[in-house]
Amino acid sequence: MLISVCLCTYKRKTLEKTLKSLVNQNLPDDCNLEIVVVDNDVDGSGREICESVEGGSVSINYQINAERNLAAVRNASMENASGELLAFIDDDEWAEPDWIESLYQAMQRYQADAVFGVVNVHYPEPTPDWIAEGDMFGKDKHATGAVLKKGATSNALLRSEWVVDKGYRFDPVFGKTGGEDTDFFHRIYKAGGKLVFDNGAVVSETVEPHRLNMAYLKKQNVRIGQTHWNYLWSKQTGMSFYKTGLFVIAQVVGAAGLTAIFFPFGKKRYAKWYLLLVRNLVKIKTAMVGGEKVELYGNR
């Protein structure tokens, strides 16, 4: 069985570390690996890195797609893939040697359509204490086998039939805001796909220094709130719509109270609650009046 790793990149020096972790995977006996790299840089800055790493039994299929839309670039990576399974990892991450094998085994064990794994976050020096100790960029973790309703391309394995036979693609509407992967996998879930989590499949990343501040975190949470409205809440009807609304209001009330309580003790104590408040206020604002979308990608 061929597994294609779909990897999008744009001017990241960490790409070399990512690729080296992929070509050194301990693969299941019945599997082979190819890496599909789609470079969003029109100048092809990632080509030399790919050529320096390529070798052995793992081929690297390098392409350029300069469209300033992350969803379009992700679609190009899938459309250039030949595998029966599609794996996803980011270009600022590196995978443990058994990453692919763990995802693959979990897919077989749970008869899943998609499997998602652990993303360990490392903080560079110097990182503000309130960010590192509060693990402000930490990713959700679940028990192995837990059934999910959404997922992310930071660590995933998907049956390619959802792309090849059923025509699923990342929605370009999310191509500059982010959240295209949340929407993509949630649509697969809504169509009957089984999404599960695997604690044994581990990748890691180091947070980029320019993100280590409240301004970036606030912008990120505004985007998350907008994405929640666009992929989920706005598409609900009847009682589901109102139940979600009540839950969001409860989150606002709770987060506001906890922010006020912990505010005197500094960011280390109140930051997470403040960002939760921001995220849910944005959901309500977007539901009521819309608003200009926060664009995290494509504007360079």
Image: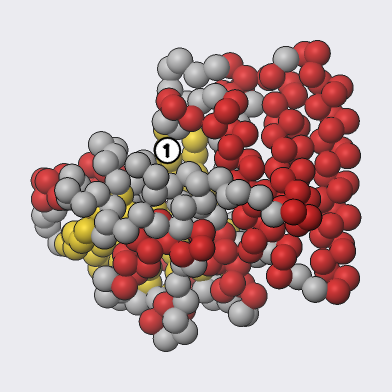
Which residue is at 82% across, 60% downward?
244
The chosen color scheme is: secondary structure
Which residue is at 79% across, 19% downward?
263
| Viewer-nearest residue: 33 or 205 | 205
Residue 28 in the figure: left or right of residue 222: left
| Viewer-nearest residue: 208 or 178 | 178
Residue 295 in the figure: left or right of residue 77: right
The C terminus lies in which quarter of the figure?
top left
Residue 58 in the figure: left or right of residue 211: left
Please provide percent x and percent y for residue 60: 18, 59
Asked where in the image residue 55 lies, by quadrant, the reply is bottom left
Q: Is residue 266 above or below residue 77?
A: above
Can residue 148 be seen here? The reply is no
Which residue is at 88% across, 39% downward?
253
- Mark 1 residue type: Glu
- Name the residue carrying label 1: 205
Determine the secondary structure under disc 1: strand
Which residue is at 51% across, 63% downward?
173
